[in-house]
Amino acid sequence: MIISFIGNCQTIALCILLQRLLRKKPHLIVWLLYGDEFKEHDWSQKCMNTMIEYDESLEQIKLSDVIIFQEINKNKSLFSNEETLRKMKKSTCTLIKLPSIFFHYDNYDKSLIDLQNREAINNVTIRVSQIINKYKTETLMLTYNHPTMFLYLEILTEICTLLNIDFFTKEEYSKLIDNKVDIGLPD
């Protein structure tokens, strides 16, 4: 299976985690650069199989069995939007759309409503607002735009469910939660 991620640093983290999860299986998992603002982003270098050239990325989209992406404004990205991806992808390719996660705990209610509105407008596949609301007594963001390992793993759980992929064992999960820098995610 060929799985491509397109989006901001949140999709890089999810790509790293899925690569880790499926490291012993015959899958190609790649992160595609959506725009120049991430070209020199050193985080993308921590992810195996990154494509930062547009021509390579466009070809990868055509080969992908699954594309996990964030809707990016067409002015910023040639292809990280549902309209273009639907035209480019092969007919059997599954699209999974994620929201760009921005959340301010100092204004929880407004941030939750804003996230829910962005999710509705962009018609996302995975609603992160539901995860945040489910665990409202926990802080699931390191900064307003960088989720905790717990939130990444909750999102990955939903991706795995959609793709019928077995999730990490309890032991692997515990190691990831306890030692998040092990895979190069921000502390």
Image: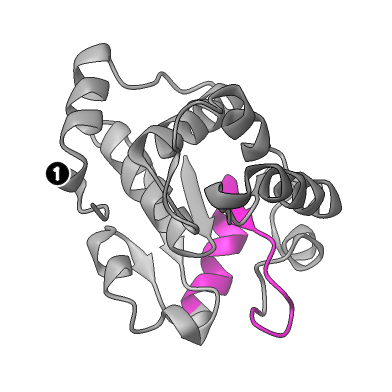
Q: Is residue 41 left or right of residue 33?
A: left
Mark 1: which amino acid? Asp
Which residue is drawn at the image coordinates 54% and 63% (left, top)?
7
Question: Is residue 22 visible in the rendered structure shown here?
Answer: no
Q: Which residue is mark 1?
A: 182
* Front-lying residue, 139 or 175: 139
Q: Is residue 44 above or below residue 136?
A: below
Between 115 and 63, the residue placed more toward the observer is: 115
Apparent side of residue 164 relative to residue 26 in the rendered image (left or right): right
Horizontal arrangement in the rendering, residue 104 relative to residue 74 (left or right): left
Above or below, 147 relative to 26: below
Q: Residue 113: x and y, percent?
A: 77, 45
How far from the left and from the top, in percent, is residue 66?
A: 58, 45
**How far across and how far down the image is residue 22, in percent?**
32, 33
In this figure, what is the number of numbered marks? 1
Does the image show residue 113? yes
The residue depicted at 63 percent of the width and 58 percent of the height is 70
Assess whether residue 66 is covered by the magenta stretch.
yes
Task: Pick out the residue farthest to the front.
Answer: 106
Q: Quadrant of residue 80?
A: bottom right
Q: Name the element at disc 1.
A: helix
Q: Residue at x 63, y 50 (%)?
A: 107
Q: Which residues are magenta?
A: 56-77
Display colour scheme: one colour
As for residue 84 lying within the magenta part, the answer is no
Q: Is residue 48 left or right of residue 61?
A: left
